[in-house]
């Protein structure tokens, strides 16, 4: 499995230069059956990453541009009367894809943002009294601009907690940026990407995550991290049980990507910032990274 995962990472790294760790974390989120939030300024490659990931995985892909006038029906779909059929016919929205890019999600109103909540948690949507299942796998990648930029609505905590991980791509290093400037257009390269995984391969990898084991001592370490986060000064609340379950799933996926069938503390520490930072921000931009560093430094691996 590690060889297969490495081939996917190498293919994605050929598009997103100098972002190996972010690429691995994004893939980790997909294998853990989570959702991904990417926060950065425009033009950093957020859309390119989501499209490339869908292409390499051979998954159906839809991009939704969130704006302040976007309505829930524009995301979920709507029913329209069909004169020939003499009945209402449902027209599915772009949410009915395996990889959905919610681009600039925080530019939409809270009402439209909330249209994603049931889809992300239950893998289904309820429209006009009928529950409709979403494709399998179902992976939401949302991008958001920094809250300091104009025309944005902060994501509520209930929505942030639905995202398994939050990433920041950041500026490329000088060498990678020079290669970008001298090389071919990334979008054209993305269109030519081949499919490296079949749907069956992906399901096998996702099912394999659940079979990765975590010892009682490691679960104790996870619990200590959760408990300590709930005691931190300046926070109204710490990490939720959902965050703990997500941390464990992500750690198992990371361990599997490293070719192991058991979780090590290193796996927890590798994914913890991406899993915890957006849950510990609570309106104080920039402080969550320091809180995460403090947790990892003060909570001992062995008690």
Image (cartoon, rainbow, N blue to C red):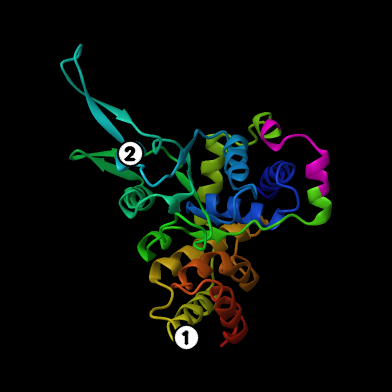
**Snapshot quadrant of residue 82:** top left
The residue range painted magenta reads: 178-188
Q: Which mark is residue 181?
A: none
Residue 89 seen in this snapshot: yes
Residue at horizontal 33%, vertical 31%? 92
Q: Position of residue 248 (x, y in %)?
A: 50, 66
Mark 1 = which residue? 232
Out of 243 and 63, give the one closest to the viewer: 63
Say which quadrant the C terminus sits in. Answer: bottom right
Residue 178 as seen in the image, left or right of residue 93: right
Q: Is residue 184 magenta?
A: yes
Residue at horizontal 42%, vertical 45%? 67
Residue 193 seen in this snapshot: no
Q: Element type at marker 1?
A: loop
Q: Position of residue 96 (x, y in %)?
A: 39, 36
Residue at horizontal 35%, vertical 52%? 109
């Amino acid at each position: 499995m590690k060889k297969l995962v490495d081939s996917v990472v190498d293919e994605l790294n050929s598009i997103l230069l100098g972002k190996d760790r972010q690429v691995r974390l994004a893939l980790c989120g997909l294998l853990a059956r989570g959702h991904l939030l990417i926060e950065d300024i425009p033009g950093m490659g957020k859309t390119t990453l989501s499209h490339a990931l869908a292409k390499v995985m051979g998954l159906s892909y839809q991009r939704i541009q969130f704006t302040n006038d976007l309505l829930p029906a524009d995301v979920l779909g709507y029913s329209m009367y069909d004169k020939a059929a003499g009945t209402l016919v449902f027209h599915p929205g772009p949410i009915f894809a395996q990889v959905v890019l919610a681009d600039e999600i925080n530019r939409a109103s809270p009402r439209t943002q909330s249209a994603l909540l049931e889809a992300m948690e239950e893998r289904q949507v309820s429209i006009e009294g009928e529950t409709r299942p979403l494709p399998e796998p179902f992976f939401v990648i949302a991008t958001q601009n920094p809250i300091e930029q104009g025309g944005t609505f902060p994501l509520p905590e209930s929505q942030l907690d639905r995202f398994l991980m939050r990433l920041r791509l950041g500026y490329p290093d000088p060498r990678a940026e020079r290669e970008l400037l001298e090389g071919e257009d990334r979008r054209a390269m993305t269109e030519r990407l081949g499919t490296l995984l079949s749907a069956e391969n992906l399901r096998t990898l996702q099912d394999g995550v659940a079979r990765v084991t975590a010892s009682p001592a490691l679960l104790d370490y996870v619990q200590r991290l959760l408990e300590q986060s709930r005691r931190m000064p300046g926070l109204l609340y710490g990490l939720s049980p959902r965050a703990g379950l997500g941390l464990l799933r992500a750690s198992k996926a990371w361990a599997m990507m490293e070719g192991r069938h058991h979780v090590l503390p290193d796996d927890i520490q590798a994914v913890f910032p991406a899993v915890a930072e957006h849950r510990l921000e609570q309106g104080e931009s920039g402080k969550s990274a320091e809180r995460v560093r403090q947790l990892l430094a003060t909570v001992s691996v062995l008690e």
